[in-house]
Amino acid sequence: MKLAIYKEILKRLQGREREEFSAIAQHYRVSLHTLMSIYSQDYQKKMKKTHQRHHSVEAVDDYFQRYQARISPETMGTVLLRIAKEVDLAPSLLAKIILEHHLALQSAESEPPSRSYVNQLLKDPCQISDPVLANEVQQCILNDCVYGPVVDSIRHSVGFEYENKLKRTLEEKGITFIGEDVMRAKGYDKTPDFKLEVPIAVDGHVVNWVESKASFGDELSHRTYLRDQFWSYWNSVLNPKE
C-alpha cells in the first residue's frame, strides 16, 4: 500500500463509526480485516498517548462518580459505554478502571486489587459480585473492537490461522523449512516462524526465514519488529549456538 493511501485512509477513519468501515474498505479496495488492523493500530497509539490523563487520581474519581450518578434501571448496560465515548477512552479500558476502583473501595485496606484478579474478572464478568457493574463491564468488553479479552482471543486465533496459512503455502511451493520447536532444539536463541533450509530469492533479495504477522505493517510496527525481533533473527538464524 502506498504511504499516501495509508494516510488518506487514516484521515477517513477519524470519527467514523464501525458501521461505516465496510464502505471505506470497498472504496479503497482493501479487506475489512486490513482496515480494522489500520484502525486498531492508530487507536492504540492514541490510547498510549492519553494513558496518564485517564489514569490520574482526579480522572478515576470523576469517571467513577459519573458511573454511580447515572446508574438506574433505564440505563443498565449503557452507562460505561456512554462515558467511554464522552471521555474518548476505549470501553474495555474504562471498564477496567471502574472495576479496579470499585474493588479497591470494597477492600478493607482500600488497596488496589492484583492485576491477575482484575484480568480474571474481565474475562468472566459473571464473577463480579455487583450484578450491575458485572453487566456494565460485559457490555464494554462485547462492544470494544480494539481492547479486551474477546479481542485478544480473536487476535490470537487470527495469528494462528495466518501462521498455518503460511506453512501450507511453503509446503505447496515445495520450499523446505524448519519450525520454531525444531529451531529451539537446535540451539537458536531467537526463532522466526519458519527458517528456510535452502534460502530463496525474492525481488533480488535473499530470504533465509519468514515471520508471519497478522496485522497491518505501518511504519511504527516495522520499526518495533525490527528492534525487538528481526535484527536478533539476523544473528541467531545465521549464527546458531553449537
Image (cartoon, helix red, strand yellow):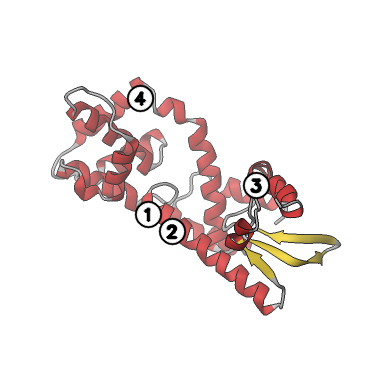
- What secondary structure is marked by label 3? helix
Residue that badge 3 annotates = 229
- What secondary structure is marked by label 1? helix
C-alpha span from label 1 to label 3? 26 Å
| Up-down relation of residue 105 to residue 214 (above or below) | above
Label drawn at residue 154: 2
> Which residue sits at x=46%, y=62%?
157
Amino acid under label 3? Gln
| Up-down relation of residue 15 to residue 108 (above or below) | below
Q: Earlier in the sequence, mark 3 or mark 2?
A: 2
Q: Earlier in the sequence, mark 3 or mark 4?
A: 4
| Up-down relation of residue 79 to residue 192 (above or below) | above
Q: Earlier in the sequence, mark 1 or mark 4?
A: 4
Q: Nearer the viewer, residue 133 or 110?
A: 110
Residue 51: percent from left, percent from top: 46, 30
Q: Nearer the viewer, residue 31 or 131?
A: 131
> Which residue sits at x=72%, y=54%?
237
Amino acid under label 1? Val
Which of label 3 and label 4 is nearer to you? Answer: 3
Residue 234: percent from left, percent from top: 74, 50
